[in-house]
Amino acid sequence: MLESTSISDERTTTYATDADLWNVMTNELNSLYLLSFLLTADHDKARQCFFSGMGQYEEKIGVFMSWTRGQARRTILQRAIGMIMPAPERDDCSFTLLKGSTPPREMNLFDAILGLDTFERFVYVMSVLEKQSDDDCSTLLRCSRRDVIITRALALERLANTHDTCDQPTETVGARRTMFANGCA
């Protein structure tokens, strides 16, 4: 005689609830606002980006729980892009890293990031700090992958020229110089 057996899938997919979204927002409050500020480079615009982004994020109940943190950050990115509309400069398509570079001067990294051109700042924050892929950056910024790669290299070069290395341990400065020299940064 055959016995019926029921097989149940022990893996359950957890969806984010109101409470989950609220926890992400409160736990990530400072970093989400900092992301807004680094992208917009203006406190009023950062607040507007942050609050409108969080309002849009609240509507996303039902996303997978594991995606909630990333979704909050992506929502901020999308809001900032919509507000600022960064675009690559098209005056010269050749790859010249030092064109328009600022002369070396001492400043902290935070001020140096805010001092980047708008598109450079967005590419740097998205690709380096937020670790978005070149494809994701080009899709979100509506530009070519080449624009992202060139702009990131330019931003890194400018930051290397303006970053105050006196506040860092010698081995960190040496490692960064080696990364830049080897083209790994």
Image: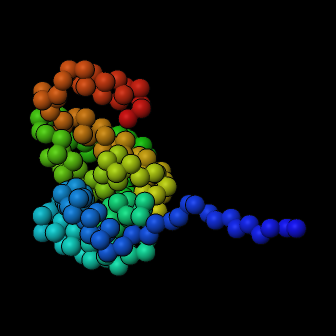
Residue 64 appears in the figure: no
Q: Is residue 49 above or below residue 88?
A: below
Q: Quadrant of the N terminus?
A: bottom right
Residue 107 picture location, percent across and down: 12, 39
Residue 97 picture location, percent across and down: 35, 40
Residue 52 picture location, percent across and down: 24, 75
Q: Is residue 50 above or below residue 105?
A: below
Q: Residue at x 44, y 69 (%)?
A: 15
- Protein image colouring: rainbow
Number of marks in picture: 0
Which of the 4 quarters of the picture holds residue 49? Answer: bottom left
Q: Quadrant of the C terminus?
A: top left
Left or right of 132, for residue 164:
left
Q: Residue at x 38, y 59 (%)?
A: 70
Left or right of 92, for residue 110:
left
Left or right of 41, for residue 87:
right
Residue 151 picture location, percent across and down: 37, 48
Left or right of 90, for residue 34:
left
Q: Residue at x 46, y 51 (%)?
A: 134
Q: Residue furthest front?
A: 1
Residue 171 appears in the figure: yes
Q: Residue at x 17, y 46 (%)?
A: 110
Q: Residue furthest right?
A: 1
Which of the 4 quarters of the picture holds residue 100? Answer: top left
